[in-house]
Amino acid sequence: MNSRTLRSALALALITPALVHCVPGFPGGDSCPTTAEAAMKANFGLAAEAEGKVKAALAAGAALQDLAVEIETDVATACGNLAKDLGATDIEPKEEGPGKKAEAACAAAASALGEVKAKAKGQVQIKVIPPKCEASMSAMADCAASCDASIEPGSAKVECEGGEISGQCDGECKGSCTVEAGAACTGECSAECAGECSGSFSGTCKGTCEGKCNGAAMSGGQCDGTCDGTCKGEAQGSCAGTCQGSCSAQCEIKGQAQCSGSCSGGCSVELKAPKCSGEVKPPKMSAECEASCDAQVSGKLECVPAQVRVNISGAADAEAATRLKAAIKAHLPALLKVTLGMKGKLERMVAGVETTLEGAQAVVKGGGAAALKAGACVAASIKGQVDASVSINVSVKASASASGSAGAG
């Protein structure tokens, strides 16, 4: 939040006590809408344009606050579990405040990672396939029609910029088809494959191994143990190629006309429930509605987890190396969701909410009974928005710090 907006927020907060105790129905903001949906349905009695600005601002603020809580909780949980798995016990924050739980847990995780790495004394190599986060284009269209009266429901044109569109294809899928984890996979699997892996494989193999079997070079011989290379037979492990079986993450199948999963790259008919992996561009509408809808849609991103492969070579302490590998593989994906999958969207979202704040501030300074009613809610929302912005910033930095300590810089 810029200094001008923050000063305005603080100034408005100072006059709030005088407002909230003299405005019936708005004691301390307790009767103010606390969700985006409730904000858009509220009625403050302002002129139409002013009413729209205030409602859009409150909806954006509610979405931002909800997302801030979710992100801090997710980061604190991932870092806390990572720290605990590596033997740390003190992960609670020493002080209260926005983002402090995530900050304390990630500091403990970074410290524990350093200690266990020093004990293992091996070379840690991490390969990451980034998470893929998508936003609903249908949700953006619905929000636009709800926020801006000039847009007719069902007519909003939404575009996807800087990413690909995917969704349910009831016709012929002309690109790639992605099926959910655990479904039959005869395509690209970037995670655990149970079946036959043609590609870079590391895990248990009962069949023909091309590469190394139990550490010994092998070219097409029978392997009943650990295979690093290609396994043709019964495989159970990490596969970066074509999996003939089931994949623990999403499986991407190219050139499949009939797609029972999510189709991207083109469909012979209009996609249902389309999602965008880039920036969802709404139709032309007010700046307040655009920022509000972006906040609400970005707050409900659907993310395919990052895939993490960890290799530790030359370890002096095998037990420590095993523990380190397992902990990183289990908990790093949740951190990468924030630092790689959501960071840019979060920055844009926070900046957009500031736009709605400025518009709402101009309205509530206009005076009148209706403005006083709205002012109590705007003041309460501004305080929450400031805290939410700080929480998101702290949580993202904490997540990035722990990810870097793990070796995923």
Image (tube, rainbow, N blue to C red):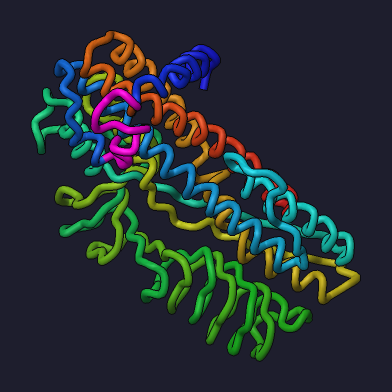
Q: Where is residue 358 in the image (x, y as percent from the top left)?
A: 38, 16
Picture layout, residue 180 above or below residue 103: below
Q: In the image, residue 200 lies at what x, y percent?
A: 60, 67
Of 192 and 212, the residue lying toward us: 192
The image position of residue 188, as x and y in percent, is 46, 64
The percent position of residue 377, horizontal first and vertical second, equals: 33, 28
Question: Is residue 396 at all visible to an observer of this figure?
Answer: no
Does residue 335 appear left or right of residue 44 in this picture? Answer: right
Q: What stretch is highlighted in magenta?
A: 21-36
Residue 101 lies left or right of residue 197; in this view the side is: right
Q: Nearer the viewer, residue 116 or 390?
A: 390
> Residue 371 lies in magenta, yes or no?
no
31 in magenta: yes
* Image quadrant where residue 285 sits: top left
Quadrant containing the C terminus is top right
> Residue at the spot x=42%, y=64% of the render?
250
> How many numbered tags mark residues here?
0
* Prevailing SS of the magenta stretch: loop
Residue occupying image coordinates x 52% and y 50%: 337
Which of the 4 image quadrants contains residue 84? bottom right
Q: Establish if 158 lies above or below 364.
A: below
